[in-house]
C-alpha cells in the first residue's frame, strides 16, 4: 500500500489484454455487480465481502473503455 507508486489495479496491463476480448470483459461487467449491501455479488461468492466496484470490475471497465476507443 505504498503511496505514490503510480500503480492502480484498474489500469494495469490486464485491462489492455481484456480490451481485445469483449466476451470476457462483457461477462465480468455483467457478473460483478453490487448487491443491496454495496458488495460485489461475484466476488462475494469467492468467500470474502468485497466492496463494489471490485478490482475485476474496475479492470473490466477500463478494458471496455479501451475497446471503445479502438486500436491506436
Ligand atoms: Zn467482483
Image: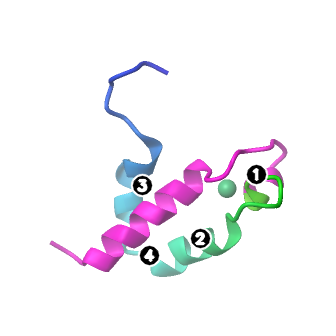
- Residue at (81% x, 41% y) in the render: 48
In the image, residue 15 lies at what x, y percent?
40, 59
Question: Looking at the picture, does residue 32 appear above or below residue 55?
Answer: below
In the picture provided, is 3 more to the left or to the right than 60? left
Quadrant of ligand 1: it is bottom right
Spatial CA span between label 1 and label 3: 22 Å
Q: Is mark 2 within 8 Å of ligand 1?
A: no
Would residue 42 be found to the left or right of residue 11 on screen? Answer: right
Position of residue 72 relative to residue 40, above or below, is: below
Question: Which type of secondary structure does the marked residue at label 3 adopt?
Answer: helix
Residue assigned mark 3: 14
Q: Tell me which numbered mark, 1 or 3, is placed earlier along the sequence.
A: 3
Magenta span: 43-72
Marks 2 and 1, how far apart at CA = 14 Å
Indicate which disc, 4 or 2, sits on the residue closer to the N terminus.
4
Which residue shows up at 80% across the image and 43% down it? 49
Q: Pointer 2: what residue? A: 29
Amino acid at each position: 500500500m505504498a503511496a505514490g507508486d503510480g500503480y492502480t489495479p484498474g489500469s494495469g496491463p490486464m485491462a489492455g489484454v481484456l480490451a481485445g476480448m469483449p466476451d470476457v470483459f462483457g461477462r465480468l461487467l455483467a457478473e460483478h455487480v453490487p448487491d443491496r449491501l454495496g458488495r460485489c455479488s461475484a466476488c462475494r461468492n469467492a468467500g470474502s465481502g468485497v466492496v463494489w466496484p471490485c478490482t475485476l470490475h474496475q479492470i473490466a471497465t477500463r478494458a471496455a473503455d479501451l475497446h471503445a476507443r479502438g486500436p491506436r
